[in-house]
Image (spheres, helix red, strand yellow):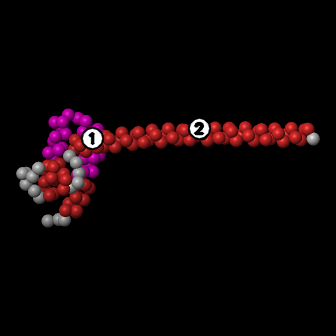
């Protein structure tokens, strides 16, 4: 029998990666369709862990440190929502910084114009 770490690597390389790919889309389908994948995933986990059908699925997922498909779907949706929120905050901060830079440039430009005007006046007066 293979080491548990190697079995985990096999699971995450060949099964979990396929489950996660596009989960945001396909897991929104009817639960009847998702249940087929859940059952198949449970079977694969049982085979890899060499346990009987009497073992509860919570133990299967806990041992491999993963989630069943419906909670995995929720986790990925939450991740997308958080990344979108962070992205919008980054855009907002970037715009605020650009506006602040423009305002500083206009203040500096007006100060320079004022000093140039003062130099011009001093040259014309003398």
Which quarter of the rendering shows the N terminus? bottom left
> Image quarter for residue 123?
top right
- Helix, strand or loop at mark 1: helix
How crowded pointer 2 is (Cα within 10 Å; few <14, some 14-19, many 20+) is rated as few
Q: Is residue 5 above or below residue 58?
A: below
> Image quarter for residue 79?
top left
What residue lies at 22% left-to-right and 44% top-to-bottom? 69
Work out whether residue 17 or residue 93 is closer to the camera in this orientation and state it.
Answer: 93
Residue hosting label 2: 99
Residue 7 percent location from the top left of the image? 20, 60
**Residue 76 visible in the picture:** yes
Residue 48 percent location from the top left of the image? 15, 57
Work out whether residue 118 or residue 94 is closer to the camera in this orientation and state it.
Answer: 118
* Chief secondary structure of the magenta portion: helix
What residue lies at 23% left-to-right and 35% top-to-bottom? 29
Tell how many labels.
2
The tag on residue 74 is 1
Work out whether residue 16 or residue 81 is closer to the camera in this orientation and state it.
Answer: 81
Furthest residue in direction right, as rendered:
126
Q: Is residue 22 above or below residue 60?
A: above
Q: Is residue 49 magenta?
A: no
- Looking at the image, is mark 2 or mark 1 nearer the viewer? 2
Which quarter of the rendering shows the C terminus? top right
Question: Nearer the N terminus, badge 2 or badge 1?
Answer: 1
Furthest residue in direction top, as rendered:
30
Work out whether residue 52 or residue 114 is closer to the camera in this orientation and state it.
Answer: 114
What residue lies at 64% left-to-right and 38% top-to-bottom? 103
Residue 57 percent location from the top left of the image? 14, 49
Write the start and end of the magenta stretch as one range.
Answer: 15-40
Q: Is residue 22 magenta?
A: yes
> Image quarter for residue 109?
top right
């Amino acid at each position: 029998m293979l080491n548990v770490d190697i079995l985990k690597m096999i699971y995450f390389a060949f099964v979990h990666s396929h489950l996660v790919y596009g989960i945001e889309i396909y897991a929104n389908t009817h639960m009847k369709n998702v249940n087929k994948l859940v059952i198949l995933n449970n079977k694969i986990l049982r085979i890899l862990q060499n346990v009987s059908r009497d073992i509860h699925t919570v133990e299967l997922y806990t041992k491999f440190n993963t989630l069943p498909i419906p909670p995995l779907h929720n986790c990925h949706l939450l991740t997308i929502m958080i990344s979108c929120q962070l992205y919008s905050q980054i855009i907002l901060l970037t715009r605020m910084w650009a506006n602040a830079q423009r305002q500083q440039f206009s203040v500096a430009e007006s100060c320079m114009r004022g000093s140039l005007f003062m130099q011009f006046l001093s040259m014309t007066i003398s």
